[in-house]
Image: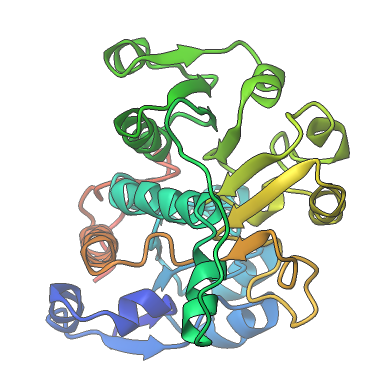
Amino acid sequence: MTKILLTTTSFQDTPGEHHKLLADTGWEVIRARGPLNEADTLALVGDVDGYICGDDLITRKVLEKARPKLKVLSKYGIGVDKIDVKSCTEFGLPLLFTPGVNHTTVAEHTFLLLLAMEKNFFYHTDSTRSGSWKRKTGHELLEKTIGIIGLGRIGKEVAIRARAFGMNVIGFDVYWDEKFASAHNVKRVQSVDEIYAASDYISLHTNLTPETRDMVNAKSIAKMKKGVLILNCARGEIVHTSDMVAGLKSGQIGGYGTDVLDEEPPKPDHPLLKLPNVIVTPHIGSRTFESVQRQATAAVKNLILAMHGDKPLAQINPEVAVKKVV
């Protein structure tokens, strides 16, 4: 029987038609609770034909064990930085993903983090829950400048919501969409340094690449406005953790709202978990019923199409031919 490995927890924990879609294939589904490290992933591959993954670490070593049995790798989501894409392509393994399914949800989560910081949300809820009535003065978003690094689908949705709050929006992206920017009054800057210098809030929405890894570091933090708030619903590794901690403690950074960390799940003593001017959520920016169902359905459809030799909805390495395997 065809065997499918399923590791993404939001897929498994959220009800919806995606469960029936996968069950109706008649394939045997092997479930594990991701994200998995290399050792755990290695232990599960080798006898599976298809793989629906979340943020598992899928290295060349994993892929070498998985082949030739593994025929299709279907990513639940859009980030493939934990997957050795080059080796997938070399081994002729189709790597599929699900763009365009979570941008609304992640943009909303970005504003959850921003509003929680600017309105001292947790301070006030902790106060009332404890039977107190302590209050702190917060800040409006109106007429503040938000700098968006990465104006893809998610960054664009953040820009739309920022304009609804009456904010000034500036953006940096190598692939600039002038039509969108003109329609939503987003000012283009020519470098990230301009974002750093002008922004009250900086929102990170870029992919994790060798160029963006540790992009927020001591050198770049020094170029920012004192007291800047930084939002990260992209990847934890875009931020150099120890430099971020130093900036938060010194007051150069006023606050850090993040849905992602450089280590997930983090150790209990992770330095960002206890700072008073940090809000960390456990990588759930895209975990809404609506978004999960869209992502999961797309991931299953991709898998089914590829396993039957049909063109999937979206493929990272389209130069790899998809062959019928069932």
The quadrant in which residue 223 appears is: top right
* Residue 283 shows up from this direction: yes
Of 231 and 289, the residue lying toward us: 231
Q: Would you say 74 lies left or right of 235 here?
A: left
User: Looking at the picture, how far across and down is residue 316, in whole percent?
Assistant: 43, 44
The mark total stands at 0
Figure coloring: rainbow
User: Looking at the picture, how far across and down is residue 187, in whole percent?
Assistant: 46, 13
Of 41 and 222, the residue lying toward us: 222
- What's the residue at 72%, 34% (across, down)? 211
User: Looking at the picture, how far across and down is residue 105, in whole percent?
Assistant: 32, 54
* Residue 281 shows up from this direction: no
- What's the residue at 49%, 54% (across, down)? 119
Q: Is residue 185 above or below residue 205?
A: above
Q: Hey, which residue is sitting farthest front in the picture? A: 133
Q: Would you say 270 lies left or right of 280 here?
A: right
The quadrant in which residue 147 appears is: top right
Q: Is residue 148 above or below residue 9?
A: above
- What's the residue at 51%, 28% (across, down)? 144
- What's the residue at 75%, 40% (across, down)? 216
Give the quadrant of the C terminus.
Answer: bottom left
Give the quadrant of the N terminus.
Answer: bottom left
Q: Is residue 125 above or below residue 192?
A: below
User: Looking at the picture, how far across and down is residue 173, in whole percent?
Assistant: 53, 22
Q: Would you say 252 lies left or right of 261 here?
A: right
